[in-house]
Amino acid sequence: MIPLSTVPAALLAQGLPGPEGPSVFETFWASGPMAKAVLAILVVFSLVSWAIIVAKAVQLRRADAHSRRFLEGFHRSKRFSEVSATATRLHASPMVGIFQAGYAEIDAQMKAAGASAEGGDYRLRSMPSLERTLQRAIHVEVAQLGRWTPFLATTAAATPFIGLFGTVWGIMVAFGDIGLTGSTSLDVVAPGIAEALVNTAAGLAAAIPALIGYNYFAARLRRLRVRMDDFALELLSLAERNFT
């Protein structure tokens, strides 16, 4: 009969697997409430970040597609009223908001002078006013496109430190267990080490996608901002050429 102390070696000698111990996650779930609370916070950060990443990717993709179609229609049109009719179908484009704000300002100034925005016999009262209107519209569109992206930056900055807190807490638990039992065996320190490892990994898993997503969307928004500024300048030039 094989002694109990030699069972694993005997099994291995026969080509059979030895008894398996609990996994890191099984050990983690046997840990204290603080580790689970830290992990829950990190999971919430991660889920919200992924939701923002997916939603923002869809929003910016539609904005790019609608912007291309709007600019094509804008350059083909001969009258602002034609552009306005096209713009209603391409509301995802930030150019539409800028054009509608500028068109409304032109129309208001022309009506104040006793004509419609399509009239060629009246001049705009204030080009600086139109320029300020376009700048305000740009700020509104940039704020709308960039909504919720600061949460990605917060996640990228905060979650590694939240995970680090869980790591420190797990090490404290491990040392506390050593002090209580006077033993440094793996069975004693495993729960604390599991807390440290799982929370460290969870913090990085939440931070890395958020950081990549934030930098990617920030670059996309900068490119869109340049296109919005160029379009505003083009609209100003058309207004100055036709209504002054």
Image (cartoon, rainbow, N blue to C red):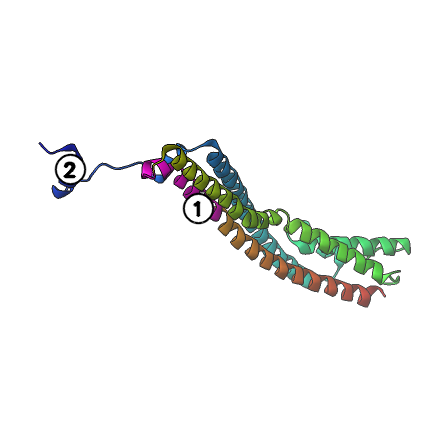
The N terminus: image quadrant: top left
Q: Residue at x 56, y 56 (%)?
A: 215
Q: Distance from label 1 to label 2 (Cα)?
A: 36 Å
The circle drawn on residue 234 is none
- Quadrant in which the C terminus appears: bottom right
Residue segment shown in magenta: 184-205
SS for callout 2? helix
Q: Is residue 57 above or below residue 38?
A: below
Q: Which residue corresponds to mark 2? A: 6
Determine the residue positioned at 34% across, 39% down: 184
* Magenta segment, prevailing SS (helix, strand or loop): helix
Which-is-in-front pick, marks 1 and 2?
2
Up-down relation of residue 27 to residue 63 (above or below): above
Amino acid at the residue labelled 2: Thr
Residue 180 in view, yes or no:
yes
Secondary structure category for the residue under label 1:
helix
As rendered, which of 13 and 43 lies closer to the eye?
A: 13
